[in-house]
């Protein structure tokens, strides 16, 4: 295993990326200003499993500035920005991440973080939490979780085996999912698609699988670029919402032969399968922006063509029944593998929630039960208020008469 590719990458470029993100993440600076003198994380060892991007660097540096010692690995073998990892390593953060890890290396890096004896774990997809819980790892006082898929896994773990420490489900905070999942993933998924393929979206038939927060963001951006968007769903309420938002809603089987671009956003497994792929048009593009690389049946593609042609960086052409089927980023999360992940402005909301949740665990862990917790409402309000202030937006407030009217019967 390479111990740390960071040594060979460009620390200076990583620092410039960090500074760029930092300057667009005003809320994090505000939180730092407020808490720095108190050093609320002094004496705490934190373990992180997040995509190692410039925005994550801002979070890790903020946690370090608040007193924590940090070990981090990547939440995906292909999403690390090596220059950012180099910069973090240079700043005294123990970092086990590099771009292009194989499965064994990825797992070894997770193990390194767990064996660094962290007290609080911050995860994206619950890989650390699942491991720490199955090892019944001692000394962990709590954790936080960044994404929808991670929350789903933790809920299952809570029901089946019980959690061994409390976890704050950051994803479920409105100041996270309404912005990060929708606007962040919406924009960065289309950005990832552009960088990988360079194709014109206008006039293309784009099929978005799943109309949750991520699907809504992706569909809006694809439509904004002139795509003709169809939604597939399993939930009648989401399907209705998509319909009234003006999209065609169809079964995947019924749209498989007409779509030009398919983007999975469900968090489910085996969504685009053989029965769909065999119907698809020549030249169709398949991409995934859900957390794990399980939404497209990539195994089937490799069974049909064991030696796909890498036509571009991050695009492989599979020859199946005389047709070319293009798979982007090997079915892994497109916005992080082919793009830079979410823009810093939305990540400042998500990571503000992360910092407040870590502080919450540090302060109250001995009063908490071993279960999933929501981000407290007052934290959501604070994060939104900080963001509004950082954007220099001014709000109206209720007049005396309006307050009285609100409380009248
Ligand atoms: N790429 C990123 O940066 C990023 C950011 C946030 C979340 N995510 C991930 O994206 C995925 C979706 O997140 P979300 O917050 O939108 O979740 P969500 O629960 O809000 O939405 C998922 C939607 O998919 C639908 N669905 C489930 N199975 C389906 C199927 N077989 N066919 C069609 N629709 C189906 C569900 O009914 C639901 O409406 C998760 O894996 C999440 O972790 C990725």
Image (cartoon, grey):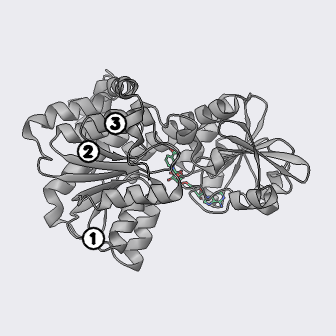
Q: Which residue is mark 1?
A: 137
Can residue 253 be seen here? The reply is yes
Residue 325 point in image, percent of width and height = 80, 47
Residue 153 point in image, percent of width and height = 45, 66
Residue 275 point in image, percent of width and height = 81, 62
Mark nearer the N terminus (1 vs 2): 1
Can residue 398 be seen here? The reply is no
Residue 179 point in image, percent of width and height = 44, 39
- Cα–Cα span, label 1 and label 3: 27 Å
Confirm if mark 3 falls within 8 A of ligand 1.
Answer: no
- Near mark 2 (Cα within 10 A), the count class, few <14, some 14-19 or many ≥20, is many
Task: Indicate the quadrant where residue 18 lies.
Answer: top left
Q: Nearer the viewer, residue 103 or 289?
A: 103
Q: Mark 3 and mark 2 in contact (Cβ < 8 Å)?
A: no
- Compared with residue 28, is residue 319 higher up or lower down, i.e. above or below? below
Mark nearer the N terminus (1 vs 3): 3
Q: Residue at x 21, y 35 (%)?
A: 31
In terms of secondary structure, where does tag 1 sit? loop
Of all residues, the one furthest to the right in this rendering is 322
- Near mark 1 (Cα within 10 A), the count class, few <14, some 14-19 or many ≥20, is some
Q: Mark 2 and mark 1 in contact (Cβ < 8 Å)?
A: no
Task: Indicate the quadrant where residue 187 lies.
Answer: top right
Q: Which residue is mark 2?
A: 355
Question: Which label was assigned to residue 57?
Answer: 3
Left or right: residue 74 compared with residue 259: left
Q: Residue at x 19, y 49 (%)?
A: 359
Left or right: residue 156 compared with residue 278: left
- Cα–Cα span, label 2 and label 3: 13 Å
């Amino acid at each position: 295993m390479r111990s740390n590719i960071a040594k060979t990458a460009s620390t200076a470029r990583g620092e410039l990326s960090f500074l760029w993100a930092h300057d667009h993440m005003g809320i994090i600076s505000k939180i730092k200003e407020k808490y720095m003198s108190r050093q609320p994380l002094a004496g705490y060892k934190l373990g992180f499993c997040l995509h190692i991007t410039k925005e994550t660097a801002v979070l890790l540096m903020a946690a370090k500035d608040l007193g924590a010692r940090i070990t981090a690995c990547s939440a995906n073998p292909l999403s690390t920005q090596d220059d950012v990892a180099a910069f973090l390593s240079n700043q005294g953060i123990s970092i086990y991440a590099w771009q292009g890890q194989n499965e064994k290396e990825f797992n070894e890096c997770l193990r390194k973080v767990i064996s660094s004896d962290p007290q609080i774990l911050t995860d994206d997809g619950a890989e650390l939490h699942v491991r720490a819980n199955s090892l019944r790892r001692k000394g962990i006082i709590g954790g936080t979780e960044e994404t929808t898929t991670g929350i789903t896994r933790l809920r299952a773990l809570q029901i089946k085996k019980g959690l061994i420490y409390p976890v704050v489900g950051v994803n479920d905070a409105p100041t996270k999912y309404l912005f990060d999942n929708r606007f962040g993933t919406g924009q960065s998924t289309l950005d990832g698609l552009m960088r990988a393929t360079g194709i014109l979206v206008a006039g293309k038939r784009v099929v978005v699988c799943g109309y949750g927060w991520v699907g809504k963001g992706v569909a809006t951006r694809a439509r904004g670029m002139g795509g003709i968007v169809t939604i597939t769903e399993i939930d009648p309420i989401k399907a209705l919402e998509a319909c009234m938002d003006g999209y065609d809603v169809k079964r995947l089987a019924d749209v498989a032969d007409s779509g030009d671009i398919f983007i999975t956003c469900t968090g489910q497994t085996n969504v685009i399968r053989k029965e769909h792929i065999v119907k698809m048009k020549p030249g169709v593009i398949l991409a995934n922006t859900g957390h794990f690389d399980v939404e497209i049946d990539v195994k089937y593609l490799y069974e049909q063509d064991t030696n796909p042609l890498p036509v571009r960086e991050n695009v492989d052409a599979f020859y199946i029944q005389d047709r070319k089927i293009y798979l982007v980023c090997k079915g892994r999360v497109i916005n992080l593998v082919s793009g830079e992940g979410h823009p810093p402005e939305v990540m400042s909301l998500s990571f503000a929630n992360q910092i407040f949740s870590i502080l919450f665990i540090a302060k109250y862990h001995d009063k908490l039960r071993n279960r999933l917790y929501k981000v407290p409402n007052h934290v959501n309000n604070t994060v939104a208020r900080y963001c509004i202030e950082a954007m220099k937006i001014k709000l109206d407030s209720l007049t005396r008469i309006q307050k009285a009217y609100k409380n009248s019967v």
